Image (cartoon, rainbow, N blue to C red):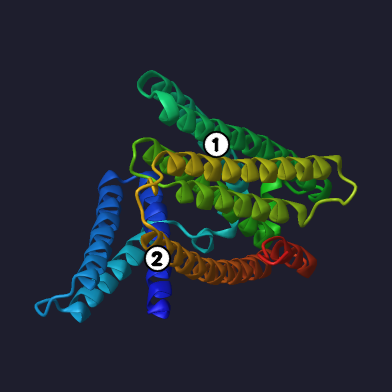
Amino acid sequence: MLPFLNECISLATCMVDVVVHGKATSNLVQDVDQGVSLADNCREVTLLCIDLYTNYQTPSASIDFDKQSNELIRRLNSLIDKTTILLPKVSDISKEELGDLVEKELQLTHETIDEAVRLLEAMMTKSREQDTGIKCEVNGQILDSCGKLMQTIKVLIVKARDLQKEIVSQGRGTATAREFYTKNHKWTEGLVSAAKNVGVNAKVLIDSADRLLSGNGKFEEIIACSQEIAAATAQLVAASNVKADRESKNREALTHASKAVNSSTAQVVATAKNCASIIEEKSTMDFSSLNLHTTKRKEMDAQVKVLELEKALEQAKQQLYKLRKQHYQMAGEEAGWDQSVITNLDAANNPHN
């Protein structure tokens, strides 16, 4: 039973990621019809997964689980195909275009963060007008911590742009900036990809915060999104530092900005966990009417649940670590990073460190 439960938890976690990132991607699509189609596909996948879980809990002879599972797989493959088509790959861009793309992508990421800050401020104002008591307190704490995170990311993007200008000016000689980026296209691809990643994850965090405030989201989504932002900014810093002078003041400023992002991310995680505890305490079950036998039974059930979840959590952490390790390895090879950079990123994300 425990292995099956672990697989269910793993599937549910993956489905949350698929739906959250899929919906965020649909918001980035310029073609409205394509964006709506992708969002609808995400909704269909979610409903199919819920039906599958529900039918497993209340099995019936008339239910064909294989058919339901195959349909879910088919819809997931359709979602993958749509996402692959909609999201442009850096590899699809010519080397000449890459020369113009770095500054544009960093500027676009900067604008995305600005928009995220404006949306958070609007959500804060709306919450203060509509919510009261604990809900208002919790919403305020979440939005405040997310807002501070966005501000630190904004500073990080500015420092990254300053460092890129310095790298280009020192390394291009008589060449233009575009020619320099084109000549070093592998590094440029890594930089563009990292900048895109920061912007996408920022939008996902805002969407998650909006759902949480409307009562349809979870604190765990906020935590996961903020951690993804930390990973994305680490990738951006690594990509930026590859060709930087070790004694560069701009490189030092970028490092300080990265530390500020990590600190803000940790604050978002701590705030989300604290707010979740506040909500849980409010809805805690009253045990005063239970007899000794029932209390002991519930205590044992709770202990078993804790052990199961701890094991599932450890497995999920290991899976996430391995995925990020593979991600950094592939990104590093493509962008020409030093092995030491990849090793440092790997160590920073090791759950046992």
Which quarter of the figure has residue 1? Answer: bottom left
Residue, far right: 247
Question: Could you tell whether 352 is left or right of 14 in the image?
Answer: right
Mark 2 and mark 1 lie on one chain; the one further toward the N terminus is 1
Question: Is 339 in front, or is 185?
Answer: 339
Observer-side mark, 2 or 1, equals 2
- The residue shown at (76%, 63%) is 344
Quadrant hosting residue 52: bottom left
Q: Residue furthest top?
A: 129
Q: Which mark is residue 297?
A: 2
Q: Where is residue 171 in the image (x, y as percent from the top left)?
A: 81, 51
> What's the mark number on residue 34?
none
Q: In which quarter of the image is the C terminus?
A: bottom right
Image point (21%, 81%), residue name: 66
- Is 84 left, or right, of 334 in this rendering? left
Left or right of 73? Residue 281 is right
Where residue 70 appears, as percent x and y from the top left, is 24, 77
Pointer 1 residue: 146
Residue 84 appears in the figure: no
Mark 2 in CB contact with mark 1 (< 8 angstroms): no
Label 2 – label 1 distance at C-alpha: 40 Å
Residue 229 lies, in percent from the top left, at 58, 49
Residue 327 location, quadrant: bottom right
In the structure shown, which secondary structural element does the residue marked by tag 2 occupy? helix
Q: What residue type is labelled 2?
A: Arg
- In front: 288, or 171? 288
Residue at 19% across, 70% down: 58
Check the image and report above or below for 287 versus 321: above
Q: Residue 56: in sight, yes or no?
A: yes
Q: What element carries label 1?
A: helix
| Placement of 303 over or under 38, stated as above or below | below
